[in-house]
Image (cartoon, rainbow, N blue to C red):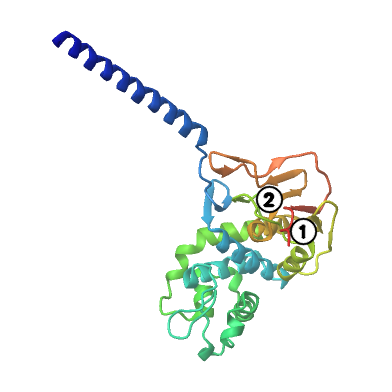
Amino acid sequence: MRRKATFAWLTVVVVVAGLIVGGGAWLLNSVRGAFVPSLAVGCTATVGESSYWLAVDQSENAALISGLAIQRGMPARAASIALATALQESKLRNIDYGDLDSVGLFQQRPSQDWGTVAQIMDPVYSANAFYDVLAQVPDYVNLPINDAAQIVQRSGFPHAYAQHEPLSRAFASALTGQTPQGLNCTLPPAAAGSHPETVIATAQVALGQLPMHAGESNTVVIDAGDAFGWMAAHWALANAQSLGIVQIDYEGLRWNRAATQDGENLGWQPTDAAGTGIVTLTLAPPAVA
């Protein structure tokens, strides 16, 4: 009887062990099959050997601020100063609160004659208000970024802007078109694309009246010329998330939203697409009403 009991017990142990091993192997294979590296969503500006990161919403605001500087005929240095200021004041987010009555990207105060709350909460208005004052600062282009920002803002923390200079210069350089291929964004799959007319209207706010039109197969074509090509391409990339842009072609290079590896976008890759000065944006299909 004891031998039979021992044999039965060993049989149970073997069966259970087999189930555990088999189940473990099944679970491991299932996890392997289902595992997809998470995407490092955000945008990176690279200048030389240095790279700097911003979240998608911050990058959109940075692109608007930078585009408005060029639209006004101001140099990329002005955009660097503005970005450093907005990073310190609001972390480049259009917030409706702040110290005392400060609001918006630049934490401007209605009580200090920056405008009404509604006006300041408009990023286009607030950025232009900042540039209006900056343009009156003598020789601001040659001032340290921190000092130029402080003259405009009159902050209680007069040396705080300097810490944002490297990031601000990198993003300003990319977003004003000074650094070709300087911006890359990793984004989740697009849920839906905007209509071409919406993309054109949004682009014209930041980029001015560059020639644009709706192309074939749900595309938008921007005739940016040599001077503004990379500015337009990088603006589109910074806004690809909100506008549902899935591909950008410029000067034989392509950014493809789906081209990722190890959780990051591959960036601008060579393609046979041609067109000097022509930026082509491909949109995801619009949402079905």
Residue lying farthest to the left in this orientation: 2
Q: Is residue 19 visible?
A: yes
Residue 201, by quadrant, is bottom right
Q: Nearer the viewer, residue 131 or 269?
A: 269
In this rendering, would 255 be left or right of 147?
right
Q: Is disc 2 placed on a helix, strand or loop?
A: loop
Residue 253 image point, x, y percent:
73, 44
Tally of marks: 2
Separation of disc 2 and disc 1 at Cα?
A: 11 Å
Q: Specify few, some or many for label 2: CA neighbours under 10 Å numbering under 14, 14-19, or 20 or more.
A: some
| 30 on left or right of 66 | left
Where residue 99 sits in the image (x, y, percent)?
43, 81
Quadrant in which the N terminus is drawn: top left
Q: Secondary structure at mark 1?
A: helix
Point 78% across, 53% down: residue? 279
**Amino acid of disc 1:** Ala
Describe residue 249's horizontal placement relative to residue 88 as left or right: right
Q: Position of residue 15 (x, y in %)?
A: 32, 19
Name the residue rendered at 73%, 58% in the picture.
Answer: 288
* Residue at the disc numbered 1: 227
Do the residues bearing badges 2 and 1 touch, measured as CB atoms within 8 Å?
A: no
Q: Quadrant of residue 272?
A: top right
- Name the mark on residue 180: 2
Judged left or right of residue 108, residue 201 is: right
Q: Report x, y in % for residue 222.
A: 80, 58
Q: Is residue 144 visible?
A: no
Depicted 140 relative to depicted 256: above or below: below
- Mark 1 surroundings: few (<14), some (14-19) or many (≥20) residues within 10 A: few
User: Which callout, 2 or 1, points at the residue further toward the start of the chain?
Assistant: 2
Q: Nearer the viewer, residue 144 or 177?
A: 177
Amino acid beneath label 2: Pro
